[in-house]
Image (tube, grey):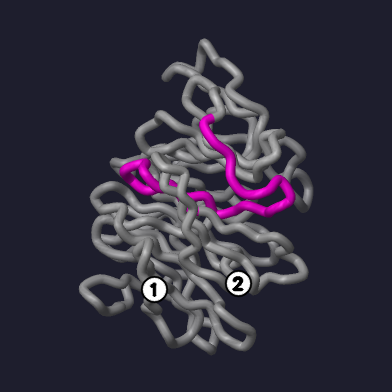
Amino acid sequence: MVWLANANGSDRRALVRAAQPVLSPNGRMVAATKFGGPGGLGLFTACGDLMSQFFSSHDTVTGIAWSPDSTQLAAVVAQNANQAPFDERLDVIQVASGRVTTVATGFLGGWGGPTFSPSSRQLAFANVPRVGRSPNIWTVTVGERPVQLTRRGTNQYPVWGPRGLLYQHATRDGKTYLDRFTGGRSSTVMKLQAWPVAVSKDGTRLAAESAACGVVWPVSVNLATRTVVHRFPPSFAPYGISPDGRSLLISGARPAADCGGPRSIIATVPFSGGSPKLIAEGTDPSWADSRAAGIQP
């Protein structure tokens, strides 16, 4: 169930029964999957009216990403993700016209979601175009051919911020780094055992996610000083960062015995660590002002 609420959480109203809701940056539209209709992806107004629906209810739709100007919506669409992973499509929807353009095909769903540039003109994504290749970062403008940006090692989880395109770079010996592509070339920002999720509006603070032995946890990173500020408790995952970079949006379950508890909560936590502020019970949150991408299910 998707709810609308005012700032203090009162006057809540059910919008639609759906899964994976993603609010547009202008706050006027909601994209959601599994909403009970014949389409695999529905666009709703903030008043709960269904504007349009796309794809088939039998399709698997993941990696939903709004452009910053809310005029475009990108999603990874798979007809049979388990048996034909290299047949996935990256589709871009023009919201005003409803036109759908396939901008890339391949194995797109396992390396982080698509991410729009701040200008909304380009889309970056990680892809394995065919068997035997490693994931790499690509960029595309609708109507043009995709361009491969990276070529060595494993490159995934792209997040576009105001200071360039951030992504995780892994070498063959297992070391992982945070790299940035800007000005036509890549450079290493820092060694980091985590992948980028969302960057603050000024590009100086990063919400990242790390994992080991099947457990994930949020990490806050100061990009100006190139240091890890805080590692948050396990069994939670980061889903965004506030525009000013002071808070992280997280979701997960408090540990019970050796695994996560049965009840998932959504909370915000200070960037430098501290007590979480409970928002609601639930999963898969998103912040309208966040450029969150690469979220793990």
Q: Amino acid at mark 1?
A: Arg
Q: Is residue 151 magenta?
A: no
Residue 267 x/y as whole percent? 53, 35
In the image, residue 181 sits, relative to residue 234, either above or below, namely below
Q: Nearer the viewer, residue 127 or 249?
A: 127
Residue 273 x/y as whole percent? 43, 45
Q: Nearer the viewer, mark 2 or mark 1?
A: 1
The numbered mark at residue 145 is 1
In the image, residue 100 sits, relative to residue 279, either above or below, namely below
Q: Nearer the viewer, residue 289 or 48?
A: 48
Q: Secondary structure at mark 2?
A: loop
Residue stretch in magenta? 51-74
Identify the image quadrant of the N terminus.
top right
In the image, residue 290 sits, relative to residue 190, either above or below, namely above
Q: Quadrant of residue 225?
A: bottom left
Residue at x 54%, y 23% (from the top left corner): 49
Residue at x 62%, y 49% (from the top left corner): 55
Residue at x 44%, y 38% (from the top left corner): 287
Marks 2 and 1, how far apart in space?
17 Å
Q: Check if mark 2's residue and mark 1's residue have beta carbons within 8 Å.
A: no
Q: Quadrant of residue 53?
A: top right
Residue 21 visible at all: no
Residue at x 53%, y 43% (from the top left corner): 250
Q: Amino acid at mark 2?
A: Phe
Seen as rendered, the residue at the extreme top is: 11
Residue 211 x/y as whole percent? 60, 63
The numbered mark at residue 107 is 2
Q: Is residue 54 magenta?
A: yes
